[in-house]
Image (tube, coloured by chain):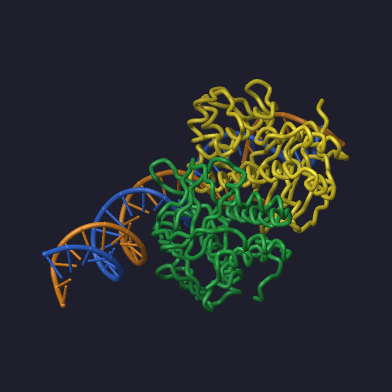
Chain colours: A green, B yellow, C blue, D orange
Amino acid sequence: MDSPQQMLVRNLREHSRLADDDIDEIRSFSITTRELAADQDFVRQGDRPEVAVLVVSGMLARYHLLEGGRRQYLSFHMSGDLPDSQGLFIDRMDHALCALGPATVASIPHKQILKAFARRPSLGIAIWRETLVDAAIFREAITNNSARAKQTRMAHLFCELFYRARVSGLNRGNKCSIPLTLVQLAETLAMALATVNRTLHQLRASGTMEFHDGELVVLKWRELQKLGDFNADYLHLKKQLPI
Amino acid sequence: MDSPQQMLVRNLREHSRLADDDIDEIRSFSITTRELAADQDFVRQGDRPEVAVLVVSGMLARYHLLEGGRRQYLSFHMSGDLPDSQGLFIDRMDHALCALGPATVASIPHKQILKAFARRPSLGIAIWRETLVDAAIFREAITNNSARAKQTRMAHLFCELFYRARVSGLNRGNKCSIPLTLVQLAETLAMALATVNRTLHQLRASGTMEFHDGELVVLKWRELQKLGDFNADYLHLKKQLPI
DNA sequence: CGCCTACTTGACTTACTTCAAAAACAGTGG
DNA sequence: CCACTGTTTTTGAAGTAAGTCAAGTAGGCG
């Protein structure tokens, strides 16, 4: 089992080159970890966080809270991700952050990170890039929910999550954990619950994938990718995964 | 008429505090300006830009290109904005950037900006923050297109653009220029062209706003804001505008 | 004057939402 | 071990918002 520090290094290396001194800097972070129950909020809209969060295990989600308690999920984060690195330079949270299933998170005080930037600007740039990839994923979500047909849209989401899981080595063969209920999928993909269920059945019928109990099984990756109009370029990884 | 350098300073100051040395650094940028025709691309998907763009006049838009030439517009940028500051640390463009009406843009070589960061880290942080506000706007767009009713959605877009115009002093009283056609609104708001037109008429009928020939007229700001479920917090400005 | 683009309007159709109810399942406690 | 409760998933049926299609108007420009 990796330390949080090692997970962060591995994550940043997916898109950035790190010098040995950068890595030493990360190693020196004093990190406290904490367990979250399923559905528990870690940060709420309006908060002024003083620590950055690193996902250690499980999955976190960012969401907007809407009138009447409805949610719009914005993004999902798995081990190694820094789901609110933006909090470093933005005072107030404009969205909330919660655990999807049970999860472990590590907190790193902002102060410590800022000091590290002063010593190692290149580390700051790596984390800046992390926030930029984040933004690219948001852009893709706009297009996904706005311009793609429902089935394509859902396939695209699963493609992204599976691809990212593979990049981080979090898949088990053609499976990976995506601890979402149908209601949460609905609140992610701008579909009604009934439609989510039916679309999921269509995808299963297509023979490309299955999704049960928070577990995704990819049966035909290439076809699923085509079905979901998925092209991983927007993830801005240093190296593409083999198909 | 302000110089591009001054526009950038003013823009960054909307969310960040700049030291005099930061401003001097910006003043020292050597900037070349260029005119763009309506609809002209400045950067294309897949490009590797070596300059950052600063909007001097007119409006630029970022968009994803989809199968069959359809577009999904992602964000709009007015004078003072740096619509692809992310290009500083992300190699390949995952989206394109075009002029909406005729526009003037200034280009600042990446190299020059990076050197400035080395001398003035606080300037780097201001521009980092600019990219983070950008991301917050993308998140809001996800929610807007995914969770809001069509009329609310359209009202929200106009609220955002008018509010931002006011912050930058680009409005003329209760009017401001938004050089979008109905087709482009459709490709922004995830609606069919016919629906855009009808929704626009509903908004006019509500007496809160009008939109003709790329010109927005806000008649009842507070009501429009309510209609559009608009709350400016996500723009992360240092000071709120008076209502 | 004629062409092109932008906007407008109406009628038709349907994919989706909404509503409602039941089945499956997990967890709790008797 | 089984009944009870709550959540999640499944399915059906009905109604409608909005997409598509198609035609027409208006305006701008060479």
- The reply to whether residue B56 is in sight is no
Q: Position of residue A212 (x, y in %)?
A: 41, 70
| Identity of the residue drawn at 66% across and 66% down | A14
**Relative to the observer, which residue lies in front, A225 or C27?**
C27
Q: Position of residue A87 (x, y in %)?
A: 57, 47
Indicate whether A9 appears above or below B178: below
Taking A47 as reference, is B96 left or right? right
Taking A165 as reference, is B110 left or right? right
**Relative to the observer, which residue lies in front, B42 or B131?**
B131
Question: In the rendered picture of this protein, how many numbered marks are placed on residues?
Answer: 0
**Relative to the observer, which residue lies in front, B158 or A42?**
A42
Q: Position of residue A55 (x, y in %)?
A: 52, 61
Taking A200 as reference, is A169 left or right? right
| Identity of the residue drawn at 73% across and 56% down | A122
**Relative to the observer, which residue lies in front, A165 or D27?**
A165
Choose top left, top right, bottom left or bottom right for residue D24: top right
| Identity of the residue drawn at 54% across and 46% down | A50
Choose top left, top right, bottom left or bottom right for residue B67: bottom right
- The residue at the far top in this view is B173
Q: Quadrant of the C terminus of chain A?
A: bottom right
Taking B136 as reference, is A105 left or right? left
- The reply to whether residue A235 is in sight is yes
Q: Position of residue A185 (x, y in %)?
A: 45, 58
| Identity of the residue drawn at 42% across and 63% down | A198
